[in-house]
Amino acid sequence: MTEEHKHGDDCGCGHDHEHEDHVFVVTDEEGNEREMVMVYTFESEEMVYAVLLDRNDPEADGVIFRIEEENDEAFLVGIEDDEEWERVTKIYEEIAKQEN
């Protein structure tokens, strides 16, 4: 008989729960679902953005989404405005250069 372990911040299991992956299922233009992991967030012009990587292909290019909140819930929103996209990709490229 196996016992199910409920993880929590102070469960004492040795896992670092503060650094567990934030996984999202994202559907692309062709209708394919991919598990994406949030690896980075940053702010620009009072908006918050998230960089997600494919969980099964971490070497693939990341995807940037805007995070919007409504009724205490957060949503990932695609960036459709070209000017906003150019601005956030430049910011992320600078961050990536500094990280490397």
Image (spheres, helix red, strand yellow):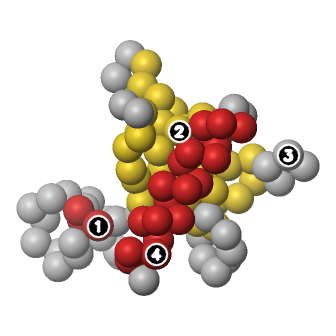
Across and down, in percent, residue 56 comes to 65, 74
- The residue mark sitting in front, 1 or 4, is 4
Dividing the picture into quadrants, the one containing residue 10 is: bottom left
Point out the tag, 1 or 3, that comes first from the N-terminus.
Answer: 1
In terms of depth relative to the viewer, which is nearer, 74 or 61?
Answer: 61
Across and down, in percent, residue 46 comes to 37, 31
Tag on residue 70? Answer: none
Point out the tag, 1 or 4, that comes first from the N-terminus.
Answer: 1
- Cα–Cα span, label 1 and label 3: 30 Å
Q: Is residue 42 left or right of residue 5?
A: right
The reply to whether callout 1 and callout 2 are in contact (CB within 8 Å) is no
Circle 1 residues within 10 Å: few <14, some 14–19, many ≥20: few
The reply to whether callout 1 and callout 3 are in contact (CB within 8 Å) is no
Q: Is residue 40 left or right of residue 76?
A: left
Point out the tag, 3 or 2, that comes first from the N-terminus.
Answer: 3
Point out the tag, 4 or 2, that comes first from the N-terminus.
Answer: 2
Dividing the picture into quadrants, the one containing residue 36 is: bottom right
In terms of depth relative to the viewer, which is nearer, 50 or 99?
Answer: 99
- The residue mark sitting in front, 4 or 2, is 4
Tag on residue 66? Answer: 2
- The residue mark sitting in front, 1 or 3, is 3
Say what amino acid the circle numbered 2 marks: Arg
- Cα–Cα span, label 4 and label 2: 21 Å
- Cα–Cα span, label 4 and label 3: 29 Å
**What residue is disc 4 on?**
97
- Could you tell me which residue is drawn at 10 percent across and 72 percent down? 12
**What residue is disc 3 on?**
29
**What residue is disc 1 on?**
19
- Could you tell me which residue is drawn at 22 percent across and 72 percent down? 16
Tag 1 secondary structure: helix
- Cα–Cα span, label 1 and label 2: 21 Å
Across and down, in percent, residue 2 comes to 35, 74
